[in-house]
Each structure stands twice: as structure tokens, then as C-alpha cells.
Image (tube, rainbow, N blue to C red):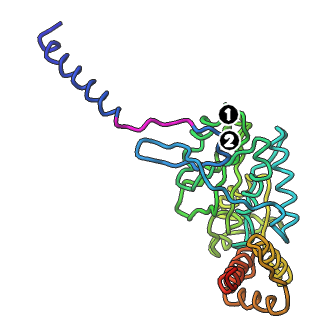
Amino acid sequence: MTGDDGKLAPLLDDGRELVRRLLEFVPRRNRLDWRAHPAARWRRGPIGAEFTPLAPLDSIALDDLLCVDDQKGRLVRNTAQFVHGLPANNALLWGARGTGKSSLVHALLNRFSGAGLRLVEVDKQALTDIAAIAAELREEPFRFLLFCDDLSFEAEDASYKVLKSALEGSLFKQSANMLIYATSNRRHLMPEHMADNLAAHHVQGELHESEAVEEKISLSDRFGLWLSFRSFRQDDYLCVARHWLERLAAEHGIALAWDDTLRHAALRWALARGVRSGRTALHFAKEHVGRALLEAPPG
């Protein structure tokens, strides 16, 4: 050992001791027990990312989702295939706000959690961690839905390429126990501008989209299952409003009979908000059931 080496050795020992002591203050990352937690969020922290349990879970059932029977039936079937180890598709639920897209995914978890389905919420900023998430979940004896709620990308946002690669790349070939379900108000997840369409052209009677349009469509096109959700018609909205009002009233032990007064009140409620949707119907029901409970005589 040279003289310089002799001087460095004590410094290295002090450095190792300092690191050891600092690590004692760093919280250790615990592996999530998926048997006890059917849903979690992938959350980034100062010392890395981890699964954080979600509780309490939304108690919504598939029977609570009315007037979306076709979308519900197709997604239930796709999820059942996935849970039973059969071929299934990544799914994009797109359309009008408040029409039950997110609620449908939560209802699926409630239906299939006993059969081994688990849900991981992943926000857009964490999409770059998809490979790491897949590696964490690959050996787990459960089936996982990676749920991206209210997903959309701006034109200059390049993070969509990570999702695009994951949907059709080798990731899902290696991770048979994972699918992506995403909801969005945008059909193609990205903004669509008139200028994009102006660059389209015809060749021998065939329409050729511009490169900008092709790029935007290529992302949503990689979801094998597309489900569209439209704004409710008036009769559908009233059906959902009545369902929630009667259910909430029964849960709180009061009787509220659906009549013309409540029907007109539900229509005025939707008109004031400018939208007829399941969410609007639920908000109406909460308002009227809560008011009835507050005004009810004691005892």
C-alpha cells in the first residue's frame, strides 16, 4: 500500500459509515400485499416509485350503470376473457364527460376482484414507468388493469410515444397478466386541428390522410377495443336520475316517490349545468335526498 492509499483508506471507511447511517433514515420500500389490496396507485416519491394502496374503494356495481348496456357488455366480456387467461384487448373508453367511463372500470374491479383482478392507477406523468411497473407485477399471481383515467396528450407532448410503444411492443407480449384501460374525452387522445386535415390529399380517388393525422390516429388505433360514450338522451338521463334517487333514499331509510315534480326538478338541474349525464343525475339525487333528510322531522 502506498502512502496515498494509506491516507485514502480512512476516508473511504468514514464515507461508508456515513452512507450506512444515512440509509437508516430512509424509509424502506415495502412490497404491496395484493391479496389485501385490490387497487393501488403507482406513485413517484423522493426515493423512487412504489405502489400505494387505494382505500376506500368505490362501491359502484355494474347494475348501477344504466343506458350504456352495449359498452358495459363488451367491456365485461373483454375483462372476463382477461381474468380467465384468454386473449383480451387493451381498451379505450372515450366520449362525453360524466357518462360512466371511469365508474365502469371501478365496477369491473368490484365484479372481478374475487377472481383475481387487480387495478393500478397510473397518471400520464408516470407512463414512462410502464416497463418498471410490468417488471414489478410480472410474477404476481393476479391479473392487473393499468388504469389511465382522463388521459390526453398535447401536440408537443412526446410522452405518448411511450404508451404507443408499450401497446404494440414487446412489453405486453412478456406481461400476460397486464392490460391497459384508459378513459378520455378525446377519441384519439390528442388535439385535432383543422390544419391537420387540410394536408390530406386524394390519389386516384383514395383519401390519404396527412402525416399529422396519421400520427395522432396511430396511438388510439393500438387499443384493440374502442368504446364510445355519448351524452344521454332526456329519457336516459331521467332513468338514471330516478335510479340514483331511489337507491340513495332507500340507503338512508326514507321514501321518495318519483313523480312529475321530481322529474321536472331533474330536468331543471341538468339544464342549469348544460349537460345530461350519469354524473349530473347522481348529483341531482344527492341534492334532493340530502335536502329531504335535512328537512325530515326528528325521530
Q: Nearest to the eye among marks 2 and 1: give it.
A: 1
Q: Is residue 259 above or below residue 174?
A: below
Camera-nearest residue between 139 and 219 = 139
Q: Which residue was labeled with disc 2? A: 169
Question: Which quarter of the image is occupied by the C terminus?
Answer: bottom right
Return the x and y of residue 297 as percentages of the image width and height: 69, 85
Camera-side residue: 272 or 150? 272
Q: Residue at x 65, y 58 (%)?
A: 215
Q: Is residue 214 left or right of residue 262?
A: left
Q: Residues within 10 Å of mark 1 (few under 14, many from 20)?
A: few
Cα distance between the residues tagged 2 and 1: 21 Å
Disc number for residue 140: 1
Q: Determine the residue located farthest toward the front in the rendered image.
A: 299
The residue located at (85%, 44%) in the rendering is 81
User: Looking at the picture, how far across and down is residue 146, in whole percent?
Assistant: 66, 49
Magenta region, main secondary structure: loop
Q: Quadrant of residue 171?
A: top right
Residue 41 falls inside the magenta stretch: no
Of the pair 100 and 90, the residue shown nearer to us: 100
What element does badge 1 sit on? loop
Q: Which residues are magenta?
A: 25-31
Q: Is residue 88 left or right of residue 96?
A: right
Type of amino acid under label 1: Glu
Query: Residue, x 62% and y 52% (percent of image)?
Result: 121
x and y, in percent, of residue 282 in the image: 72, 75
Closer to the chain start, of discs 2 and 1, is: 1
